[in-house]
Image (cartoon, helix red, strand yellow):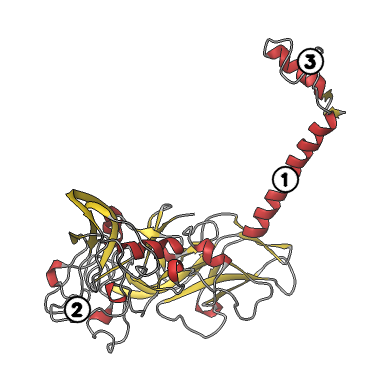
């Protein structure tokens, strides 16, 4: 049997000559293979079939490809630009040869953007022709008015910091929250596969092509036991030691949604531009020294915070909220200190009743950053505190998650 114009045995003899040997392992005195040619052909054919199947599966799962750039915001307007793309819908290829600009008129339900919401870009089967119908929707699973739809991207509509001036913020499509199937946080794969249990959205790109960070402090994302999750959503009570969470608990919740804690270096990148706290006002963040408790994540109602706070000046240049004030944030950084002997201090936190966690020798400190609800001028975009161990359960400490780019 031949491959091209040579038999396998001819090819093997050529290889033997090139390698300077008269016989190779697995061959007879003529240099021929000692196995059936049909087996070689079968294995090669199987591998070729597997490669084809893999390509088909990838195309079916992803079934989306930009032909030019990524989805971006259109300047300072509340519009996005979807580049030329192709997508498989109901086993048929549809495509847009040119970019498409979408705005409020393309929302599937309602006639305006909802502050603090994640929006998804959907493509659906057209009544005729090759161009898919594109709509915006707040639904991650069932947009209205589309046939056989598929998510191809999204963005967050929220607070934007325009400059270092404290009050220079506005509402709109958050530019660095725009994402698409080819350019997004890796953790969104969980939400795309299972939107009922995992979040898609709530993040901004802090390091281009590398790091995405939660816009909001971590709030409860459901689940139980070792499967508890943490989400990034507006107007939610942020998790803290009040719910009996310590550093270990935030680490597990982050893992369960495909994320992790930020390092101090990453946190300062995300927090840059957030105004320093104020002693007698919550204008720059929830920091007034007379505050008595945390508030909802980026609260929008005066009843949940106060009129100064809801102006939203607590926004960084990367459009991350509440970096300064409200709750300290557990970071990934940890260091060992001293040798104080064995201590049974690890069976703490929200999962302390589920199992035993062993003991520690010496001590550890984990960094927390930003400041809490009563820290005033102590709170800021580089503020850091290094006196808590990971087993510490404190009502004024929460966290924020991050994820690498796909």
Q: Residue at x 74, y 41 (%)?
A: 48
Q: Position of residue 231 (x, y in %)?
A: 41, 71
Residue named by callout 1: 50
| Side of 149 where 349 appears, left or right | left
Q: Position of residue 34 (x, y in %)?
A: 80, 22
| Side of 135 where 76 appears, left or right | left
State the residue in front, 345 or 162. Answer: 345
State the residue in front, 98 or 231. Answer: 231
| First in sequence: mark 2 vs mark 3 | 3
Please give the label number shown on residue 31.
3
State the residue in front, 22 or 74. Answer: 22
Q: Residue at x 75, y 72 (%)?
A: 128
Residue named by callout 2: 282
Label 1 neighbour load within 10 Å: few <14, some 14-19, many 20+: few
| Side of 373 where 160 appears, left or right | right
Quadrant placement of the N terminus: top right
List the single residue furthest toward the right: 1
User: Splitting the image into 4 quarters, where does residue 44 fall?
Assistant: top right
> In this rendering, which labeled residue sits more in front, label 1 or label 2?
1
Q: Residue at x 84, y 25 (%)?
A: 5
Kindly tell me whether residue 204 is visible in this rendering.
no
Q: Calculate the distance from the C-alpha at mark 1 to the C-alpha at mark 2.
A: 60 Å
| First in sequence: mark 3 vs mark 1 | 3
Please give the label number shown on residue 263.
none
| First in sequence: mark 1 vs mark 2 | 1
């Amino acid at each position: 049997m031949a491959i091209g114009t040579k038999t396998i045995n001819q090819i093997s003899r050529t290889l033997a000559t090139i390698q300077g040997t008269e016989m190779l392992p697995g061959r007879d005195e003529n240099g021929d293979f000692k196995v059936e040619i049909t087996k070689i052909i079968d294995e090669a054919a199987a591998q070729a079939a597997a490669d084809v199947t893999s390509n088909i599966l990838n195309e079916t799962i992803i079934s989306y490809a930009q032909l030019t750039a990524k989805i971006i915001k259109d300047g300072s307007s509340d519009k996005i630009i979807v580049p030329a793309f192709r997508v498989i819908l109901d086993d048929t290829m549809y495509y847009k040869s040119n970019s498409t600009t979408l705005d409020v008129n393309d929302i599937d339900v309602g006639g305006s953007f909802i502050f603090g919401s994640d929006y998804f870009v959907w493509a659906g089967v057209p009544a005729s022709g090759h161009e898919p119908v594109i709509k915006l929707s707040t639904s991650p699973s069932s947009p209205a008015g589309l046939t056989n739809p598929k998510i191809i991207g999204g963005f967050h509509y929220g607070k934007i910091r325009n400059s270092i001036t404290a009050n220079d913020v506005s509402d709109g499509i958050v530019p660095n929250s725009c994402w698409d199937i080819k350019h997004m946080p890796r953790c969104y794969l969980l939400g795309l596969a299972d939107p009922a249990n995992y979040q898609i959205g709530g993040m901004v790109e802090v390091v281009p092509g590398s790091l995405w960070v939660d816009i909001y402090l971590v709030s409860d994302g459901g689940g139980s036991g070792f499967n508890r999750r943490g989400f990034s959503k507006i107007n939610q009570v942020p998790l803290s030691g009040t719910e009996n969470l310590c550093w270990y608990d935030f680490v597990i919740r982050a893992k369960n949604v495909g994320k992790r804690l930020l390092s101090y270096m990453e946190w300062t990148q995300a927090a840059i531009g957030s105004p320093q706290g104020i002693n007698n006002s919550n204008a720059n963040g929830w920091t007034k020294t007379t505050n008595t408790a945390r508030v909802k994540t980026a609260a929008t109602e005066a009843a949940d915070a106060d009129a100064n706070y809801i102006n939203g000046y607590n926004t960084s240049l990367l459009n991350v909220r509440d970096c300064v004030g409200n709750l300290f944030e557990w970071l990934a950084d940890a260091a060992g200190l001293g040798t104080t002997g064995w201590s049974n201090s690890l069976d703490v936190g929200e999962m302390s009743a589920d199992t035993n966690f062993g003991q520690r020798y010496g001590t550890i400190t984990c960094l927390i950053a930003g400041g809490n609800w009563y820290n005033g001028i102590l709170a800021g975009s580089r503020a850091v505190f290094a006196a808590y161990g990971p087993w510490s359960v404190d009502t004024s400490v929460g966290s924020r998650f991050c994820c690498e780019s796909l």
